[in-house]
Amino acid sequence: MITPTTRIDRFQARASRGRRRLRSGRAVHLLDIENLTGASRPTTPAVAEVMTLYRRIVPIGPMDQFVVAVNHGALVAVGIAFHGVQLLARSGPDGADQALAEAARGDRMDQRFDRVVIGSGDGYFADLAAWLAECGVHVTVVSTPESLSRRLCAEVPAVITLESPAAQVA
């Protein structure tokens, strides 16, 4: 005899398998573009330059998604540089950081992606990285050397250094 509890258990087991299939092989890139460019109001060319370098050194799969956050004053310049991304805007201290962290938790990225790439060196993301790791998600940080927080670095197994082309030549 099948009881209501048995049906719920079966439904939950199927849902869990479905989430594992949904996240298999997928990654989301959470980009604090102000941090990556080193400017509170990045220009379109600066964003394009950083993203060219980012795509060259960070593994990006065909099913990967991008969520980019910026303050409202840079929304147009950043929006022009990106196509096909989820663009978030929030101003104030740590506004872009807060928007990315809320999107990650609210959109249950822990259930939808195998990997999360945090494009920022801000220590603000240390708690998010720890939560994702506890949920079984592989977390990588992409940051410039000068903006990488020790606290964030301690929470992730992998850090990719993003250096400007001028710094690479020197």
Image (cartoon, rainbow, N blue to C red):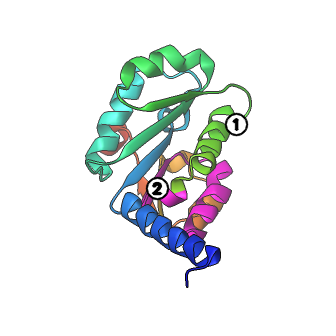
Q: Which residues are drawn in magenta?
A: 110-135
Residue 111 relative to residue 65: left or right: right
Q: Is residue 90 magenta?
A: no
Residue position marked by numbered label 1 in the rendering: 94
Placement of 117 over or under 170, stated as above or below: below
Q: Residue at x 44, y 57 (%)?
A: 113
Residue position marked by numbered label 2 in the rendering: 112
* Whether residue 157 is visible: no
Percent position of residue 152, x then y: 61, 58
Q: Amino acid at mark 1?
A: Asp
Placement of 14 over or under 97, stated as above or below: below
Q: Residue at x 34, y 47 (%)?
A: 64
| Mark drawn on residue 131 | none
Q: Is residue 122 magenta?
A: yes
Distance from disc 1 to disc 2, alpha carbons, whole Å, reads 25 Å
> Dot 1: what SS?
loop
Residue 15 relative to residue 89: left or right: left
Query: How many residues crowd around disc 2 within 10 Å: few (fewer than 14), some, or many (20 or more)?
Result: many
What count of labels does the image hold?
2
